Amino acid sequence: MKIYRKICKFLKINFLFLWVSILALYFIQIGVMMSDPTYGTGNWGTNAWANGIKFVINETTVAGTNVLFIMILLWLVTIITNRIPVTLILASVVTAIAAIAEFQVINVRQEAITEASLQEITAFKDLLGMLDIKLVVGAAILLIVIAVLLFIIYRRSRWVVFRSIRWRAVLLVLSVLVIMPFFSINSEKYEDSFVKLGDVPKVWDSLFDAASNGGIMALLNSRTTDAMVEPKNYSQQAMKNLVTKYTKQASLINQTRKNTNFKNQTVIYTLSESLTKPSYVPGLTISDDPLPNIDNIMDNTSSGHMVSSGYGGGTAGIEYSTLTGFNITSYRPTVTMPYSQLTSSINEKSTITGQFDNKIVVHPYVGSFYNRRAVYKNMGINYFYTTDSTVPVKYQKTIDGDSHISDESAYKNVLSKISKKNNSQFIQLLTMQNHTPWTFEGRDYNMIEPTNSNADENTIESYLQGLHYTDEATQTFLDKLNDLSRPITLVWYGDHWPGIFNFVNTTTDALSAHSTPYFIWQNNAAKKANGTVNVSANYADPSDFTAMMMKMNGMKVDAYWALKTEMLEKVPTINNYTRDDKGKLTFLDQRGNKIDEKSLTKEQREIVNDFKLVQYDITTGKSYLLKTNFFQKVK
């Protein structure tokens, strides 16, 4: 009879916790959906309160996963405090804070709460200063009331849940074991299990993730474990050896390079959104070439095919590779968005930004996607100019009423930011003109082939029209850069294909479907100041762009960029669209033929392993190299 009562009591508590968890999830989802109830919710309607209910009912599986996580947390609090009223009070307070915080963050940034945004809690004083004084006073009064309630509860022994210390200890261990997988949700070990439970991470857009998977699961999805397979021989001593090895290599390289740094110069990295050459698309025939100027530019400077890791998306992953020199395919397949998943590992020292005095990013769009604000702060970016920044981008014209700012305006924004001081300056431009959807009215470029397919001719021709506008704007941009007396180097590349060429078999034509144009260009002043070296590669890895750019300008390198120069000059191009659970890379020769890692020469395998050791140390390992002079600003 005694056991029966205990079982009934256990079931009653679980039933209570179930409803508390459902209500907590519901109110958190209200916070997520309040700013825009339709975002990520399909055709549910425009009422956030109704959509919160629909999430709990319609998304039964993933909603159940959110509820299960909350229930385990409730049990943990109960086991530790031994008072159910304490659990209920804390659950109510935390739910209210979470719902309000989700609403505030989304309303300001169009981002849901992620692990990266939680890091900002460390700046508590600054955050407190942003809050309304009435809210601060109200919160203080609430905390006092809660403290009094908790004191009263603890004085009443009849509310004690567990009498046995041993039983509490057993339940505590079990609860911890059950909840631990949630904190490794996208690890190799648990990812498939959580996908079966309905969680399909959308880490490229935390708000979309929170709306479709739940605010709690979106927060957990933003965490990353097992990001990279540990390379062989990883140790502190191994990293010390690398410092010695590549410091010597840097000295050898620097003997042949006359320029110390980019003082009095500007380097611009331009990511041209969704841009590829029509000539790269198998089976596509059009009436005329929309990119004659870019073709001519590529014919007269270092250029080739960039091997993209994305198709129809993946912008921030390619951007990550260009700025850090790290290769996204070196990570496990679960790492799809390093900006969101590896935020804390990104730093100024180990990126191209560490070589410059002043660095800015221009993005003629909202700045909330891909966790860029937090990432750029870590990179030491001085200002991130967007349409919603404190000082927004000045030029915001569109073409034909398109929803995105034109490339012409984007380039004007960059020109207005070029320094006139004697500092070194880095500018990154992320364009948006050719992002889906395409609504350009002109039809100067007609699709001839294929004629019998499911291809959307209107969409493709609108996209081609956009390429034409990019082509003209890019030529004008380069002409204006050439008029400047300040040395300018431009690294320009398309990030990925648009996902509109559905007549292309992306399996058999994988290389074509992941090829975009790139060029590295100097204005006349840069050629005069630095000289120039042809660094063309028919197929190039975006993580090598910085090493290529520094080589073109005859710039001296530190140990890290010496390693990247070794990769550039001695190792085939990394194949960016192939991922491997074991951390193995594949490569491409300059004809596009695949090469397995095991087929590399001994010297090449050693360089590749050195590169993996560095990437692992900084992103997943113990960051030994950050305590050395491996990364340093060349002076």
Image (tube, grey):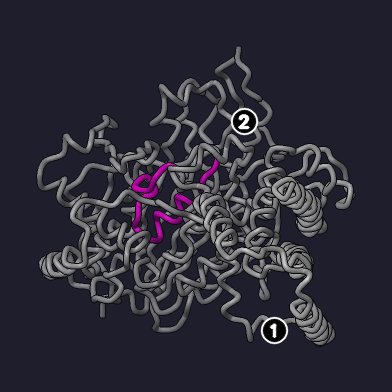
Q: What is the three-letter code of the residue carrying label 1? A: Leu
**Residue underneath mark 2:** 460
On the image, which quarter does residue 407 sit in? bottom right
**Residue underneath mark 1:** 128
In the image, the segment drawn in magenta is 313-333
x and y percent of residue 479 in the render?
A: 47, 59
Q: Which residue: 38% across, 31% down?
A: 511
Q: Is residue 234 left or right of residue 17?
A: left
Q: Is residue 327 left or right of residue 533?
A: right
Q: Between residue 527 and residue 36, name the one nearer to us.
A: 36
Q: Helix, strand or loop at disc 2?
A: helix
Residue 319 sits inside the magenta stretch: yes
Q: Which residue: 28% across, 40% down?
A: 584
Q: Is residue 541 left or right of residue 73?
A: left
Q: What is the three-letter code of the residue carrying label 2? A: Ile
Q: Between residue 607 and residue 407, name the one nearer to us.
A: 607
